[in-house]
Image (cartoon, rainbow, N blue to C red):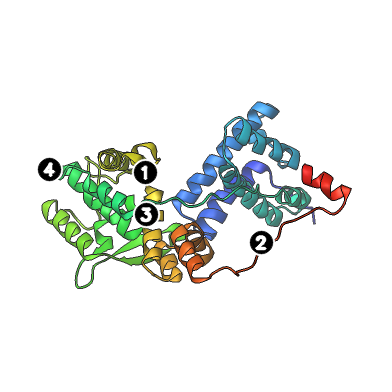
Amino acid sequence: MSASVPQGFPVLLQRFFLQRLMQQQYVTARTVTAYRDSFRLLLGFAHRQLGKQPSNILLEDLNPTFILAFLRHLEVDRHNCARSRNARFAAIRSFMEYVSFEEPTALALAQSVLAIPMKRFEQPLIGFLSREQIEAILAAPDANTWTGQRDRVMLTTLYNTGARVSELVGMRISDLTLEPTAWVRIRGKGRKERPVPLWTDTAKELRRWLRQYPRTPEQPLFPNRSGAHLTRIGLTERLKLAVQGAAQRFPELAKQRVFPHLVRHSVAMHMLQSGVDITVIALWLGHESPVTTHRYVEADLEMKDRALKLLQGPICAPVRYRPKDDVLRFLQSL
């Protein structure tokens, strides 16, 4: 029997998207788009560096030296942060894992690329807004206009549910249940769905919103002017406008970068400060692991201050340090 012909990069890349991602793993459209954009950047870099069209690129061209050069290009030339760099690299790693199974002759190459580590980066403390600031933002949109009414109920739902941007703009009227118990179905990452209960005031606003502007069940819950789903950018801009109105009451908001995910952080912090168990908050936000939710505990200085007051430090007389020899005196002088 004759040996099988090695598969080239273009064929493997197409099979990776069509078979592995879409058919076998059944990933979301957002994941496909993110991986697609990563490979667009990679192929554009290869064209400039190697002078090759995408259809002429060989697997051997994607060696560790080239991949490291591409990752440096993302950080230096495109000014990507370490998190964005890692997200692009994750797409390449996933492809190389596929290659290691589908093309045995490229196993050594795939393993050498997979050996490149993800870049570590500092995890900043989570920021959040106070309850008073959130209330001012929710009340800022003009209730006398259609967009203002939509923004009020939309931002109220955002705060109530702690939804991600994509989850909020993707909500349909059919996802909403108002009787007998009010709750909304949220379609999260990885096609995972979770029900989130609605506060009485949120449910009241949603009922009023649907009575004034009735639509079919499959239409967006928070549409744009043309009736289509609001975009991520559209939601961010409407939030910025509400923050500008709230800044008249809280001037510090004008100097702060307020974005939809900050509202998500805020509801989590407010629930934590109200005594809600951290595992419940993880379920509320759709975190796969409670470890992610523990970051809110780290950021809550009030909780740490209460713990500090409960545990008093030991009472002991201060001891003054005195160096005993020349070496210690030298080190003390540095």
Measured in 3D between alpha carbons, the distance from the residue under mark 2 to the one under mark 4, in whole angstroms, is 66 Å
Q: Quadrant of the C terminus?
A: top right
Relative image position of residue 189 (x, y in whole percent): 45, 57
Relative image position of residue 215 (x, y in whole percent): 17, 53
Q: Residue reaching furthest right?
A: 326
Between disc 4 and disc 3, the foreground one is: 4
- Identify the residue under disc 1: 232
Q: Amino acid at mark 1?
A: Arg
Mark 2 touching mark 4, by CB under 8 A? no
Q: Which mark is residue 144?
A: 4
- Identify the residue under disc 3: 167
Q: Nearer the N terminus, badge 4 or badge 1?
A: 4
Q: Amino acid at mark 2?
A: Pro
Residue drawn where x is 60% and y is 31% of the image:
44
Q: Secondary structure at mark 2?
A: loop
- Identify the residue under disc 2: 318
Mark 4 surroundings: few (<14), some (14-19) or many (≥20) residues within 10 A: few
Measured in 3D between alpha carbons, the distance from the residue under mark 3 to the one under mark 1, in whole angstroms, is 10 Å
Mark 2 surroundings: few (<14), some (14-19) or many (≥20) residues within 10 A: few
**Apparent side of residue 229 relative to residue 192 in the rendered image (left or right):** left
Residue 172 appears in view: yes
Q: Secondary structure at mark 1?
A: helix
Q: Amino acid at mark 3?
A: Glu
